[in-house]
Each structure stands twice: as structure tokens, then as C-alpha cells.
Image (spheres, rainbow, N blue to C red):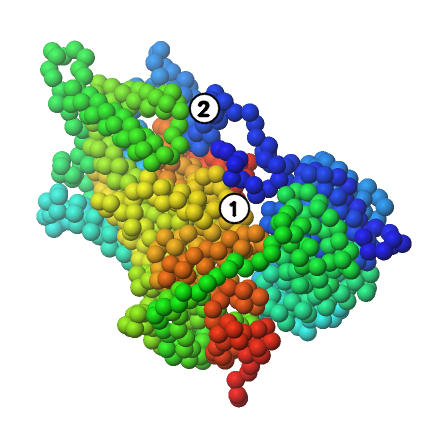
Amino acid sequence: MTDTDNKAVGAVVQPAQNRFTTALSHVLSDLGKNGIFLALIAVVVLFAILTVQDGTSVLLRPQNISNLIVQNGYILILAIGMVLVIVAGHIDLSVGSVAAFVGAISGVLIRDAGFSWWAAIIAALVVGALVGAWQGFWIAYVGIPAFIVTLAGMLIFRGLALVVLGNSNVGSFPTEYRALGNGFISFPIDTGGRSHIDPFTLAIGAFAIIALIVQQLRTRKGRSAYGQEVEPLVWFVVKLVAVAIGVGLITYALAVFKGVPITLIVLAILVLVYGIVSNRSVFGRHIYAIGGNRHAAELSGVKTKKVDFFIFVNMGLLAALAGLVFTARLNLAGPKAGTGFELEAISAAFIGGAAVQGGVGTIGGAIIGGLIIGVLNNGMSILGIGIDWQQAVKGFVLLLAVAFDVYNKRRSGGR
Amino acid sequence: MATQNVPNILEMRSITKTFPGVKALADVTLEVARGEIHAICGENGAGKSTLMKVLSGVYPSGSYEGDIVFEDEVVQFKDIRDSEAKGIVIIHQELALSPYLSIAENIFLNNEVKGALGLIDWNKTNLEASKLLARVGLRESPTTRIMDIGVGKQQLVEIAKALSKRVKLLILDEPTAALNDEDSSHLLDLILHLKEQGITSIIISHKLNEIKKIADSVTVIRDGNTIETISKVDVTEERIIKDMVGRDLEHRYPDHTPNIGEEILRVENWTAHHPQDVTRVTVNNVNLNVRRGEIVGIAGLMGAGRTEFAMSLFGRSYGSRISGKVFKNGKEIKTRTVAEAISNGLAYATEDRKQYGLNLIEDIKRNVSMASLEKLVHGGLVNDNEEFKVANEYRKSMNIKSPTVLAKTGKLSGGNQQKVVLSKWIYSDPDVLILDEPTRGIDVGAKYEIYTIINRLASEGKGIIVISSELPELLGICDRIYALSEGTITGELPIAEANPESLIKLMTMEKPR
């Protein structure tokens, strides 16, 4: 930063600058921005220590890491859709009911209508999108607040789930369907019964790390080619190495357990796609523009109603996918499924830094927020803490996370 | 300082206020005599508001250096309540009234008139409120809701509220910025009237003619320093401007040699009705045209339908039952949605950049690209490096004072925000730009820059429509001016024939009933 072109107010007091202080301020502002990531690490470390049994940490055992991902898959899927809804200044309370409704429909289609697993999945996704279109219609074109429409939706689709199921459960799904929530991909090499490491999982992990490094390097190169400021090289490398090690450790854990969970593959694809959509697509940019200032977006030619509509279509689609993953995992479609999902997804988005007023929030943040909730759930379960206290602790964490965020913004002089 | 024998009600001595990295006020001194109207002038960002926040306790004592002496006593305010208890009341530019509450409820908000059992005595509340309303000359029932009265009257309610607190020193921050001429002059009369009742006022204003009219003395602040205090007899607009910008502004409007070509836009029989009350015609059969390279002004009083005309034309953003035809280069075009208007080469920069123009929580870059993202799309994705480059080019060419395009627009000064809005529309590459109050609330120096940009756009062959409440501005930059009254064009004057008198006559012309 220079003060040459900043003559707006009085004398600008500029601290002495050298390469070290520039680098340091970069690191600090980066850590400040990624406070939520540090919070995730803190929560992991805390429970890793608390759950030590027989010399190893239960939380970090390969089986548990694999479980963590599979157990929280559907919350993370919902959080991806929810953060877009929240950025646009809306809310969706119906996703839990929609997930249950869609799970029920897929179950009934397979059991009673003889649908094959893939036809049931496609049908379920279509139903989800239609549900989203229904809610999007009321919100975008009739102008009823999303809170009301989705509160109604919460009741409507919970009720319809009961209607579809006739107040009973549907169980025993085909293996392929169940793979969505329970399946793993691995090609283990027979090592004669001793410890096995799945080479396929390792290959996927290595590929992910290489892809990440290549992508980061390309971004950095692109930015400096356009004369933009880039972070100090050392810090860039440190961060990249840290992330690579993290991915490497998780890969190892998965490789020694059952392999890559299919839920993780679905999630990875979603994060990639929605990361790009939110940041680099016109649709995504319009969501942020609407959330930041709806009038200004409208007067800039953004078709706000259309964008609102498709945000909810998308949310319906993702709620359906979450419903499928959840049903597949339990191998059961029940009328009570998905109760409270909406709250966990909304919490994830807010813990991940989304703003209540809209305009602010990221896919990555929501995923980290979801993981924090997941680790809390998982860690407290391992410790034998009951559902009662788990609820209370999660509520407290949500409050604390948002309070910290508000404090941080105020300190940095934001609104 | 008015006269020697009148004691000062307020002295702010050597006030210094530092924010992290920036010295906002450096050794500022302000002396206000009892019973006078004291104006404070300065460019945006000069430190006027900071000084008033120090005075009213928004910045508590201890957070600044220097002394505040009020009524011969050194005061140390911890918050606004402290300063109000002493009789210092500040009325901010953005009024702090609750729209759904009544006038009386607003006046006595947090200062309720209590009766038995500590409950609110509504009869007495409304009675007291009526008395206060009479003092400020507002003929409204105290039970009227704030949202049902106009901004001018709301301003009066704010003053009534101040009176209810037994105000001795009234601070008004840009009180007439959002008012029309009639409401403004009423308000100024009221301030003079309060002066007779012994109430001292500090008025912050950009409008030099108002200052000249009512102020007993003027203190000019520039870059956080007091430049000088001028007493009434010595006040001239030239002197204030010179103090404010630190140099002589010989010409407040840049030279403009029109190079006018073919007609580029013609609007025929444009009519729009009020969005809620569809029987009310707000824009009535408007016909106008703009030629290439021409700067056309629309003059009109508040409520004449200027903004309503522009917004209804721009993608039907205002109104109902809109009819009329639009021709560009002689061919009829449709402007049914904003997107359609933009793709047909129109741009509209709003009069209210904070509410309607900018995404304040986003950076300069994303605001500049907002109306033309498609231009940056390659292979289905927005090229954000290209976006950065484009925004940076505008930052330099439009002289947006920010070290980086990654700065949030909410933190820029009014002038720089306006430059961001203009950048957005220039990047959309329109043929016709409609600029609604392009210099509202921005300082003299930045105004000059905006005028220069407008001239440059005209010389590039674009057609420009400027809507403004300030007649000198229209007379200073336009080639031709339309006057609008009650939604109807009442006249059209080439610049050679236009003067304030002729325009005001047209602007106040009532249609035959």
C-alpha cells in the first residue's frame, strides 16, 4: 500500500515498511481471514487429545476419519446450497423435510413401482428440483419472504413424506443405491492378510494434491501476469505444504481403512463445481450482487427474480441429493428422517462466515463450518456425551463463532 | 466570532483525533458565539463530521486530544447522552426516525412522558408534541406516522425532538441535502427563528448560497486543519471555495465546446403512473431528444417526476401503466427490462448511490463489472484477472482515490463512490447516459472532476442527460435544458437563453386545471 494517491484525509501516518513487516502483515491478515479454518484445526486438536485411548486418539483413527466424512456428507451437501441461499439474503427452513420427502419417494418408487436404483435417483433429483421450483416461485415471483415460504414448506413436505410412506418405513435398498451413502471405491492388493493399503486411494490422493498445487500455481502466475499483488512466496509455499500434508494424512487414513467413500467423491465434485459457480460464473456473481444490494443489482441489469428462483431450484436439488445420501446410508426411508438438518446446514453456513444480511459467505467457509459441527458431534459422541449436552454445546459454538465474526469485522472497521 | 462582547458558548481547543494510520483532525480550533449560526465548510473527508462526533460524544473523551469548553466549563462526554444532557443535540444527515412510529412517539423516544405507575401518558405526550410541532411550524397531527410525511417534514420532526431535549446548541449535518428548494428555505427560516429564541446552531453544509444567507460566521476545515473563521460581512463564495480546496477555483465548471451531431435518442409521449396509485400520472406525455455529443439537462423541483421519468425509461424500474416510444438513431427500441435497456445502449446512474447504485460491501472491482459481467466471460467463466485489470484502468483514468481496486466501496468518500458508479456505466459502453444528480453530496473538487468526465463522454459522441436540483450546475454544463413540472415538460431552452429566472418560471408552471 502506498500513500501517494491517498490524499483524502489529513496526514497519513505510515509505519516504516520493509519486506519482513509486509510479509508479516500478509500472514496476519490471512490468518484473520481464515480464522474459521484455525477454529476447525483447534477443535480437531482438542478432541484428538480428549479422545486418546490406549495411546492413540480415537478421533484420528482411520475408521473414524472415514466415518466423519460419510456421517456428515449430507450436512455438507446442504450447507453448499444453503450458503448460496443465505448470500442472496434468504433462508431455507424446509431442507430437512424435503430430504425426508425425497428419500421417501425414492424408497416407494423402488419398492412399489419397481424402479431401478438409477431411475429412482434421477426421479428423486427431479422431484427435489420441482420442490425448489415451487418454493422459488413463491419467493421470487410472488414476493413472499423465504422464511415464510420455507416454513410452510417445512410443514408441507414433512406431511407429504408421511403421506407417501403411509406412516411406515421403507427399508432394503439396492446395493448400488446404498453405495451413495455407504460405498467405498478401492482396489486393494492382496498382501497376504497383513496390513493393507489401498493403492487406488493413494493415487486419488496424490492426484488431488498435484491438481491443487497446479491450480494454485496457475492462479498465482495469472495474478502476477496481470500485475496484481501476490502473497509472499514463502507464505504461499508454507500454506500449500500444510494443505498437502493435511490431504495426504486423510488419504492415508482412508487408504488403510476401506478406500475412498463415494460420498466424498460426490462432495469433492460439488465443492469444485460450486466453488467455480459462486466465484467465476455470472450466476454466482449475481447472487453476491443481489445479497450486497438488491436495488443496485436490479438497476445494473441483474434479473433478480430469475436468480432467486434458480437459487431455490438448486437448493431443492441439493436437498434431494442429501436426502438420497442419508437414506442410502441408513438403508431406510423414514418419515422422521432429516429432522433438524436445516438447522445444522444453516449453522454450518453461519459458522463458516456467511452474513445474516446477505452478500457475504463462501462455499469453502460453509464446508469448514459443517466440518466443525461434524467434529463436535463425533468427538462428543466418542466421549460418551449425551445428545442433550451435544445440542447445547453446538448452540454455544454457533453463537460464539458469529460473535467472533462480528467482533472481527467491527475491529477491522467494517460495517 | 460575531461580535467582541458576546461570550462564546462553545470553544473546542486544539482538538486532535487520530485513527489507526490516519490523522483525521490536527489541532482544530472552533469558537462559537452564543446565539449565532455558525457554518462549518469543508470538502468531504476534511474532518467536519469527525469534529462533530467529538463534540457530541460519539467519540468519547479520552479518544482525542484537546479540550471542549461548553458554557465556560470543560466538559468530558462519554457518549451522546452526556452531551444531550448539557443541551448539545446533533441531527445527522441520515435522519434517525423510526418510520412506523408516530411523530409524537419519535419526538419522545427514550425520553417518554410518563404518568401514573411509570406508564406512558399518551394524552400528555401528544399535547406536548403538538406544542413542539407548532414551534417548528409543522402542521401535522402528532399521531401521524413518520413514513407518511416527506423528508422535509421529517427534518422538522428531528428539530422538534431536539427542542424537547431543551437544546442549547443544535448541530445540523447537511440539513438541506435531501430537501427541495421550498422545504430548504422553510428550514433555513426556522433556524433563523430558533436563533431569535436564543438557540445557537452549527450547520454543516455544502450549499454556499445557504451559508451566505443565514450564517453569522463560517469556519472552513481542510485536511483536518482549521483554515480560518470568516465573519458574516466578509463571507463570499469565492473565499470559502478557495479555503476549502486550497486554491482558486476560477471556473467551477470546466470549459466545454460542444460538438453536436445527429439525434441519438428520442422519447415520444412517455407516460408513467404511480406504482401503487395507478390513477396518479407522475410522468405525463414527455417528449424529448438528445443528440450525439450533447449534454441535455432536466430541471425540475423535487417531485416533478425527473427521477420517475428516468427510471421508468430505464427498464421500467419505476411506475405502472407505462406507455410511449423510444427511438435510438431513428429506430424504435424497447426498454422493458433493465437488461434490455442496457443492451440497447442506455445507462442510468442513480441519484442515490448508496441505496441504488453500489454494493457497498463489495470492492471497487466487482462494482465496476456489475453491469457488464458478460464482457469478462471467457469459456463460460468470468476472467477475474481481466476484471482486475479493467477496474484498475478505471481507477486510474477516473482518478478514484483508493490504493487498490480491492477496497470496499462503502469506505470511499462520496465523490469516489460516484466515480465508481460512473466507471460501471462507462464500462457498459452506452450510447446515452442518464445521470441523476451526479454531484449530490460530493465536494467542490470532486464535482469539477465529475463535470470533466461528463464533458469527455460528450466529446466521445455519447448523448448525456443530466438531472439536477442545482440550477447553476445545469447552466454550467448543459447545452440545452428541459424544464419539468408536475410530470410535464413545460419548456425547452437552449443554453444561450437559459438563466435561473427563466428556468424557475418554467419549473413552477402549473398545468391548467
- Pointer 2 residue: A23
Residue at the extreme right: B5
**Amino acid tagged 1:** Leu
* Position of residue B75 in the picture relative to residue A327 (left or right): right
- Pointer 1 residue: B412
Residue nearest the observer in this picture, B356 or A127: B356
Residue that appears at 45% across and 39% down? B404
**Amino acid tagged 2:** Ala
Residue that appears at 27% across and 31% down? A218
Q: Position of residue B28 (x, y in %)?
A: 72, 42
* Position of residue A367 in the picture relative to residue A42 (left or right): left
In the picture shown, does residue A170 fall above or below B418? Answer: above
* Position of residue A287 in the picture relative to residue A324 (left or right): right
* Position of residue B157 in the picture relative to residue A380 (left or right): right
Secondary element at image label 1: loop
Look at the image and tell me whether residue A59 can be seen. Answer: no
